[in-house]
Amino acid sequence: MKVRVLGCHGSELQDDQTTAFLINDSLLLDAGTVTSVLTLDEQKKIRSVLVTHSHLDHTKDILFLADNVVGGNNTPIEVISVPKVLKILKFHLLNDKIWPDFTILPTAEEPVLRFRSIKTGTDVSINGLTVKAISVNHTVEAVGYIIRDETSSILYTGDTGPTDKIWKEANKLSNLKAVIVETSFPNHLHALADMSGHLTPFMLKDQLNKLKVPDLSILIFHMKPQYLPELENEIAALGNPNIIILKQGKVFEF
Ligand SMILES: [Zn+2]
Ligand SMILES: [Zn+2]
């Protein structure tokens, strides 16, 4: 499974973009940063977007992606998540006020975007991969995803504070190769992390203690860019050799 990091931050600064990953060139895992880093040809290859939750740092480029590919005679791009997340996208973004409703444009029969609702805890097939959504702990309805092919599984937490279910699911997997886990705020902002449903390095350590799978890559994303140097120091101080702080543009093969 090929995973390309398009953006890996929890906000935006000049050199730091919001969160999105491109899997096997055709599946987006969140869509915070897509259209400013992919060529139009690359954007046209996207067939599905897996969305963890409605926050803009994970969804905003669904809007510009739709605008960029409209009229191209492609089959609709599937926007996939649990029902509550899709409902928020429909009523608060694609509502003909914030942005045109590309779920009925250019025609209701052949729209640019097609919503696909999935249930938590149930395997679904997406672009040849097997995907399971797991509820996590954030300020809005949010899920993480376990994504599998024949040889590997990866786990993506999306945005979450301390949580249990996704780690229990991880411990059942025989071929888990990587977890992509958020760490947003440095330790001195523990109260802010707690109230906003995010992790600090201190809280990350506690989450990773729940993981019983040896020898896997722990890829950190969603660092708030203004705290990056502090986060790098505090994550390094955890002394875990498997931890990698993600950088934009990196490509992994699992
Ligand atoms: Zn976020
Ligand atoms: Zn969020």
Image (cartoon, grey):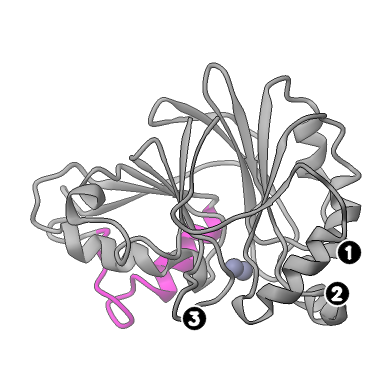
For mark 1, what is the residue? 202
**Inter-mark Cα distance, 3 to 2:** 21 Å
* Ligand 2 lies in quarter: bottom right
**Residue 120 sits above or below residue 5 on the image:** above
For mark 3, what is the residue? 13
Secondary structure under tag 2 reads: helix
Q: Position of residue 178 (x, y in %)?
A: 66, 37
The numbered disc on residue 51 is none
Q: Are marks 2 and 1 in contact (CB under 8 Å)?
A: yes
- Would residue 33 appear left or right of 38 to someone viewing this image? right
Q: Position of residue 162 (x, y in %)?
A: 83, 59
The residue furthest top is: 150
Image quadrant assignment for residue 165: top right
Q: Which residues are magenta?
A: 83-103
Q: Position of residue 12 (x, y in %)?
A: 50, 78
Q: Nearer the N terminus, badge 3 or badge 2?
A: 3
Q: Amino acid at mark 2?
A: Asn
Q: Amino acid at mark 1?
A: Phe
Q: 112 or 190, which is in the foreground?
A: 190
* Residue 215 can be seen in this image: yes
Does residue 90 belong to the magenta stretch? yes
Secondary structure under tag 1 reads: helix
Does residue 204 belong to the magenta stretch? no
Q: Position of residue 182 (x, y in %)?
A: 69, 59
**Inter-mark Cα distance, 3 to 1:** 25 Å
Residue at the image point whose x is 85% and y is 38% from the top: 211
Q: Amino acid at mark 3?
A: Leu
For mark 2, what is the residue? 187
Q: Are marks 3 and 1 in contact (CB under 8 Å)?
A: no
Q: 228 or 126, which is in the foreground?
A: 228
Cβ at disc 1 under 8 Å from ligand 1 = no
